Image (cartoon, rainbow, N blue to C red):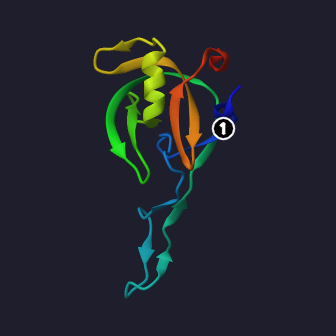
Amino acid sequence: MDAKSKVTEAPYSENGSLMHFPDTTWDYSEAVRVEGGHGWKVPPREVGPDWRPNDPFSATLRLAETRRGRSAAYFIWRSDDGREFPMFISDMLLLVQSGVHIKPGGMVSTRWIVTKRGANYGIRHAAAEEAGG
């Protein structure tokens, strides 16, 4: 196995999307400021990444858009339920070269696995030896 297989855990957001960059967010939905607006009676809730095992998964995803991050551009794949999965440009090249069938509308059904480059995460087509069952 190569270095890509060493990602043992991957960061997911509350809605189940893979986080391109694992970061803490804040939920203000139930927060209440003290009178006068300085400080919190009920503070916002800190929401960190949901770290999950990096197991290959089967999914049909649709190529939805491109985005630009701090260091590079990347693709976004989206599931029918709205979850998002970033993909590095170099992994898109490997996906297209792999021979996986890309259906009209940019739909791909395959086994995916999470990879990491620097501090960022993305999905890629799982190699046959990684794909498992």
| Residue at figure coordinates x 37%, y 88% from the top left | 36
Examine the rendered structure and indicate whether residue 123 appears above or below residue 48. Answer: above
Which residue is located at x 62 percent, y 18 percent? 131
On the image, the x and y values in percent for residue 128 come to: 62, 14
Count of numbered circles on the image: 1
Question: Is residue 109 shown above or below 89?
Answer: above
Q: Is residue 110 left or right of residue 106?
A: right
Going by the numbered disc 1, the residue's amino acid type is Val
Q: Residue furthest left?
A: 105
The quadrant of the image that shows the C terminus is top right
Instruction: Tell me residue 14's x, y (percent).
Output: 50, 47
Furthest residue toward bottom: 36
Q: Quadrant of the N terminus?
A: top right
* Residue position marked by numbered label 1 in the rendering: 7
Residue 116 in the image: state x and y as whole percent. Answer: 58, 40
Q: In front: 2, or 38?
A: 2
Residue beneath the point at 50% across and 72% down: 43
Task: Using the image as rendered, state which of residue 70 and residue 30 is in the foreground.
Answer: 70
Q: Quadrant of residue 77?
A: top left
Q: Is residue 29 left or right of residue 56?
A: left
SS for dot 1: loop
Residue at the (64%, 29%) spot, across then down: 55
**Where is residue 117, by image quadrant?**
top right
Callout 1 environment at 10 Å: few (<14), some (14 to 19), or many (20+)?
A: some
In the rendered structure, the answer to whether residue 47 lies left or right of residue 76 reads right
